[in-house]
Image: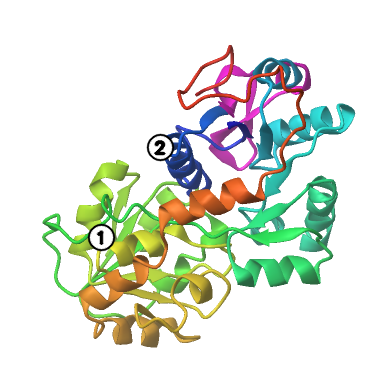
Amino acid sequence: MRVAIVTDAWQPQINGVVTVLMGLRERLSDGGHEVALVEPSTFNRVRCPGYAEVELSWRPATQVARRLDALRPDAIHLATEGPLGWAARRFCLRNRLPFTTAFHSRFPDFLAAATGLPPGLGYAILRRFHAPSSGVLVPSAGTLAMLQARGFDRLKTWSHGIDTVRFRPGPAMDMGMPRPVFLAVGRLSAEKNLDAFLKLDLPGSKLVVGGGPLLARLRERYPRVRFLGPVEREALPQIYAAADVLVHPSRTDTFGLVMLEALACGTPVAAFPVAGPLDVVGASGGGVLDADLRRAALAALQIPRAQARQRALAFDADQVRDSFVANLALIARSAAEPLGCSTATTVPGAAA
């Protein structure tokens, strides 16, 4: 099957959406499907206000239409609700082509945290974006319930997986820090609620991995915390192995892939009992969920690393791929038209 995935989030951005899509593309190709990405790198771009490292495509409608028309895919999936997503949505509606969408991020809540704007306005815009979708793929039961309460339709649960060969127990990076080491990984921005972790009175050391608009401010505010900034993805397993607990303070993540990465490396998780952690950790014994984050972090120290690893094994990446394929809306074709092949191809302006 030839699948076109349209996404406003792609490398060199470092975030959960990019990580999910990179893994999905790899698994789809391994499964014999042809994948073409329509992503921002070859479009005119402007910097996203408040997120200077994120570049958004500028007036991409004509180019997106040409690329999708040239690809002639068997299915179209809109991964994000940015300019490329809206342009692809317009193309599909004009040509009466079915498509699926995904809900990866709670942008209205992020904007509310950063600007004070009411989230209801943002959700009304997203509801309009997803309304014509044949299926809105949602990564967790908690997020699905939240969207149902806000009037979204045709929701389908599509969990995320992890490469448990790449992320597994192994040698730890020598951080030279007093133990226990409490780790946080992710984007350093307002919606991630990092202060809830950084202000905790915990023994040992605190370590933070990730970049973002708050990095300089947090470094100044918390001089006793070690901030590594962004790191190469290949180094993450050794960092997870060096930590005793991953503390995940976000209350707005739709899933929280870093929790799954940590668990796969044998690092237990401490988090709030909200959507995301409830789906990834739940009552599995791989971590501790508590409204008192300090209490959760200290209790997680008692969890055996093998027990944390066992939880991650329940999230099989091949099953995630198969679920994605099963939810795609196929585009009707005549018998004379090709259905694609198992080798990756590149068309002008589309990354294969």
Q: Nearer the viewer, mark 2 or mark 1?
A: 2
- Magenta region, residue range: 37-64
* Amino acid at dot 2: Asp
Residue 295, percent from left and from top? 38, 88
Above or below 278: residue 11: above
Viewer can see residue 116: no
From mark 2 to mark 1, how far is it between C-alphas?
Answer: 27 Å
* Amino acid at dot 1: Tyr
Q: Nearer the viewer, residue 206 or 338?
A: 338
Residue, disc 1:
240
Residue 53, percent from left and from top? 51, 35
Look at 56% across and 38% down and name the residue there: 9
Look at 49% across and 72% down and name the residue there: 277
Indicate the colouring scheme.
rainbow
Residue, disc 2:
30
Q: Nearer the viewer, residue 45 or 148?
A: 148
Residue 114 circle label: none
Badge 2 crowding class, 10 Å Cα cut-off, few under 14, some 14 to 19, many 20 or more, is: some
Above or below 279: residue 124: above
Q: Nearer the viewer, residue 47 or 279?
A: 279
